[in-house]
Image (cartoon, rainbow, N blue to C red):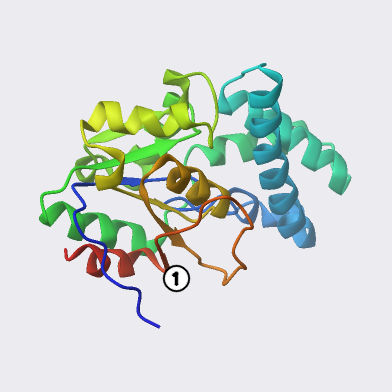
């Protein structure tokens, strides 16, 4: 079924990790060392990374995403039974230059032609986001790159989504927020944004208080939703 168009959108805000950037690409680029453990490591790393952001937010013990990503990697390597300092360094370096999904640049270019502001709103630290955007050559396609470090707490806390409202000077109901993470979509939707879920893996919907305004399987389906 083709999603219905979303009206009255004045700005488009994107999650970064898993939405624009492929978080599994770091591990897959080390398959020469990881072998058949690459997928397991990538999954454990991402799961721990997200869990640590939520738990730190609940505990009130914030650390930036670079530290959290490193701690999650240490846990993941322990789970899969790997102890290799050189590999750890290589994986962390690769996380700064994650592969970009091919449909990301297509979507951003088309939306930019519609003259709507575009932004990233991410858990990533400013250093991480700057490196990823530069590596992917997305800088000219983005008006803002916003990090949760400005508010000191992780998604899906409402203060994070408020950051986009404040910086773009657009009310929540006129912002299209785009993420591949169902929990992130729920957070943005509960805040009042028009949230679009990029369901790349045909996953089931989360059972959370709010859900997506629309669901797509690829980012290059987004411009049509916005009339861009």
Residue 80 in percent (x, y) is at 85, 48
State the SS at label 1. loop
Which residue is drawn at the image coordinates 77% and 56% (left, top)?
Answer: 40
Can you say whether 30 is above or below 154 in the image? below
- Is the residue 52 above or below the residue 24 in the image? above
Q: Which residue is mark 1?
A: 217
* Location of residue 146 (image quadrant): top left
Q: Residues within 10 Å of mark 1 (few under 14, many from 20)?
A: some
Image quadrant occupied by the N terminus: bottom left
Image location of residue 159, percent across then percent down: 45, 26
In front of the other: 212 or 142: 212
Query: Residue placed farthest to the bottom in the image?
Result: 1
Extreme residue toward the front, this view: 209
Quadrant of the snapshot with the C terminus: bottom left
Percent x, y for residue 101? Answer: 42, 59
* Residue 9 appears left or right of 64: left
Task: Please give the name of the residue rendered at 29% of the width and 57% of the height, measured from the top-left corner.
Answer: 105
Left-right relation of 12 to 35: left
Instruction: Give the side of residue 85 with respect to residue 19, left or right.
Output: right
Residue 165 horizontal/vertical position (percent) = 29, 32
């Amino acid at each position: 079924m083709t999603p219905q168009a979303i009206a009255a959108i004045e700005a488009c805000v994107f999650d970064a990790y898993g939405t624009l950037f492929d978080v599994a690409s770091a591990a897959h680029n080390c398959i020469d060392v990881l072998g058949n453990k690459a997928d397991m490591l990538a999954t454990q790393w991402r799961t721990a990374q997200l869990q640590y952001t939520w738990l730190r937010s609940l505990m009130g013990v914030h650390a930036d995403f670079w530290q959290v990503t490193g701690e999650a990697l240490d846990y993941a390597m322990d789970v899969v039974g790997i102890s290799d300092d050189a590999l750890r360094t290589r994986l962390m370096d690769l996380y700064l230059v994650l592969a970009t999904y091919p449909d990301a640049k297509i979507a951003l270019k088309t939306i930019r032609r519609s003259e709507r502001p575009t932004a990233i709103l991410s858990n990533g630290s400013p250093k991480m986001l700057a490196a990823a955007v530069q590596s992917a050559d997305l800088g000219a396609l983005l008006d803002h790159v916003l990090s949760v470090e400005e508010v000191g707490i992780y998604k899906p806390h409402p203060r994070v989504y408020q950051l986009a409202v404040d910086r773009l000077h657009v009310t929540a109901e006129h912002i299209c927020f785009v993420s591949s993470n169902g929990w992130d979509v729920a957070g943005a939707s509960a805040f009042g944004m028009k949230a679009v879920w990029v369901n790349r893996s045909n996953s089931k919907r989360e059972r959370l208080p709010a859900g997506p305004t629309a669901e797509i399987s690829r980012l290059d389906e987004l411009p049509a939703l916005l009339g861009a």
